[in-house]
Amino acid sequence: MTGPAPAPEAALERRARRLLRWYPASWRGRYGEEFAELLLAELAEQPRAWRRTVNVARCGLAARLASAGLARPSAHPAGPAAAVRACLGTLTCSLAVFLAIGTAMWAQLAVGWQWAPPASTATTVAMLVMSGSLLFLALLALLAAAPACLAAIRACARGQARRLRGPAALIGAGALILVIGGRHFGNGWPGTGGHWWPHQGLAPGGVAAFGWAATLSVTSYWAHPAALASFPPAELAWMVTSPAAMLSLATGTAQLVRRLETSPRVLRFETWMGRAAVGGMTAFLSGALCWVSQNGPSPALFHAGTIDAAGLAVLAAALAAGWQAASRARPTGPR
């Protein structure tokens, strides 16, 4: 009695390539050919083995997590320095999502703050904590950007501008669109004309107006098409364009962080900034929780709606991803 006929070589190669897709592109570029040969040899001897498929999928997912900076740095195919840059890139994406949702929530509070003092202590504490956290995160961003820009200039001087051109274009396009659109639509900020009171200046009108305009797309009106249809066409177009601009800015920044090769000292400094940013995100989330979960009815100007409760969930998820990436970023090298 004869055994099963061997599978054609072309079919085995296709199966090996499909299994390789569990791994990230960086891993396949470095180890793909060698691993494919091992898979072909095993498939030829044992065409059907579910344990092999599960093991390849498990290891592939672990490699993808390492490539994204969410697993142990030693598993990264390009070495420890690239692993730290991957962690910082993931942290950048998490921070971008956190700032987009957080700024929308803060701008909502700032509108009420311009018109009248809050009647609830929880709202006052939330506004103080959220404003201080946003200011802290903005300062950290400036401190982190300075050495990165210097390293990018040096890389361009060494003839490495080609690999940084794409991320720089994404950053420039996203920032330009946000600045122009934010300044234009900020003129319609609903906080203009509020009655003066002693602590009104805690939320600067110009900053609050720009944050409100930049995050107009974060709204529950998407669930009410009839109400959304009454918006001016230009504003609707901006509500679609602004998320794309923020995505372009965040993607370009994350790619630049991943591709920019820096000294161990700069990499360590950026890691410190990332961990400090996680602390700022934690403080902001605490303030937002204090506001959204306050007991008793709130005045209409400071009322937290369903969109704010959903925003808390997004903030928590972004903070968890950022904390995981920051905890995995452990640069090595001379101090």
Image (cartoon, rainbow, N blue to C red):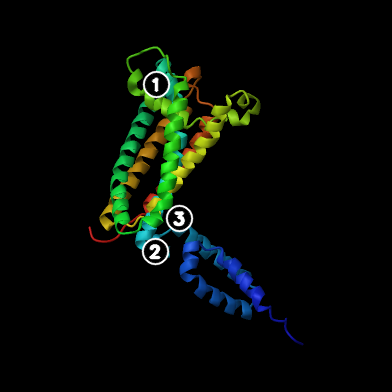
- Residue at label 2? 74
Amino acid carrying mark 3 in the image: Ala
Element type where label 2 sits in the image: helix
Residue 177 at what x, y percent from top left? 45, 36
Q: Nearer the viewer, residue 246 or 82?
A: 246
Q: Nearer the viewer, residue 321 or 96?
A: 96
Q: Please identify, in this view, whether the residue under mark 1 or under mark 2 is nearer the observer.
A: 2
What residue is at 68 percent from the left and 78 percent from the top? 8
- Quick check: can you spot residue 255? no
Q: Is residue 188 left or right of residue 150?
A: right
On the image, numbered disc 3 is attached to which residue? 68
- The residue at which mark 1 appears reads as 121
Amino acid under disc 1: Thr
Q: Residue at x 43, y 17 (%)?
A: 192
User: Eyeballing the image, is 82 above or below 219?
Assistant: below
Is residue 230 among the parts visible in the rendering?
Answer: yes
Pick whichever of labels 1 and 2 is earlier in the sequence: 2
* Element marked by disc 3: loop
Quick check: 123 above or below 263?
Answer: above
Q: Amino acid at mark 2?
A: Ser
Q: Nearer the viewer, mark 3 or mark 2?
A: 3
